[in-house]
Amino acid sequence: MKLVIATRQSPLALWQAEHVRDRLRAVHPDLSVELLKLTTEGDRRLDQPLAAFGGKGLFIKELEQALIDGRADLAVHSMKDVPVNLLPGFALGPILERADVRDALVCEVASGVDGLPQGARVGTASQRRQAQLSERRPDLQIGSVRGNVGTRLSRLDEGRFDALILAAAGLDRLGLDQRIAARLDPRDMLPAAGQGAVGIEYRDGDSRTAQWLAPLMHEPTAIRVRSERALSRALGGDCTLPLAGYATLDGEELDLQAFIGLPDGSLHARWRGRGAASDPETLGQAAADGLRAKGADRILELVRAGG
């Protein structure tokens, strides 16, 4: 029996696909698992912000086409890149155990955001990170930097920026944790919905593939991510929005923190609440309602109008 995994060709995407491949081989020793390496539109269009041409969903379009064509049986994604509403014909399978959910400050000039020099140039491709940075440090000059992790680090090393904000999980997975100056406490920088988690997509109704994949599910991570994605879905389902959601499990209860703000930091709203771990989507909806009660709709209106 053979399964084919569709994956992007960036080093981090390949790490994730190889991790899933190795996990599958470990639980199914007789299973043959191969990688189908593809380049997506999101990888090709590095000259514009993601929000300008369709968002992070463009990182999975070609992978989904490979599923439709039968060239692949499953696709591996960073959960923070997966649209909250999949297209008809696709299903979200197992979500693997979450890695470090935090964002990381990468720089040589400070050991934390508060220690960055006045007016420091900080690179990020995320409006969510920009909104939280601008709220905390309005003096910072925040610029867009896209590309794979190595490309972004090269921009820092060339002196185009004084610091970068990247996902800690990606740096850890690529063996680049020594570049991290600080792992940012979620209380200071709430992560994106699904950050640090790897998910698997396959053709809806493909029960054979679903059975092979089932042992890879990490239920505690899936519960947390479901809550975070429900928050995002309730506010429009656009993963390019300056929206953050971070859920933690406490026994039978789930704690969810949420943030939304304008990229320039001038308007923002926060919410925190608890709910039953058995119904994570209800807590996500409550978080969205709580943000709306604090002005989220106005923030969304301004973001979609370009500020």
Image: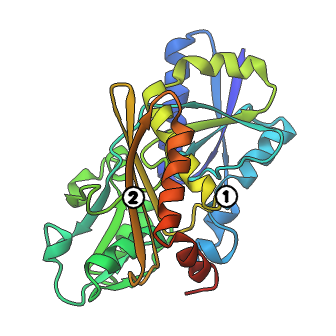
Crowd class of label 1 (few under 14; some 14 to 19; many from 20; radius 10 Å): many
- Judging depth in this view, the residue of 162 and 268 nearest the camera is 268
The type of residue carrying mark 1 is Gly
Q: Quadrant of the C terminus?
A: bottom right
- Residue annotated with mark 2: 271
Q: Which numbered disc covers residue 20?
A: none
- Say if 22 sits above or below 98 in the image: above
The type of residue carrying mark 2 is Trp
Name the residue: 74% across, 31% down: 73
Name the residue: 55% across, 41% down: 282
Name the residue: 53% across, 57% down: 288
Residue 294, position as x, y percentages in the image: 45, 69
Q: Quadrant of residue 160?
A: bottom left
- Judging depth in this view, the residue of 93 and 35 nearest the camera is 93
Asked if residue 109 can be seen in this view, the reply is: no
Q: Is mark 1 on a helix, strand or loop?
A: helix
- Residue annotated with mark 1: 57
CA–CA distance between discs 1 and 2? 26 Å
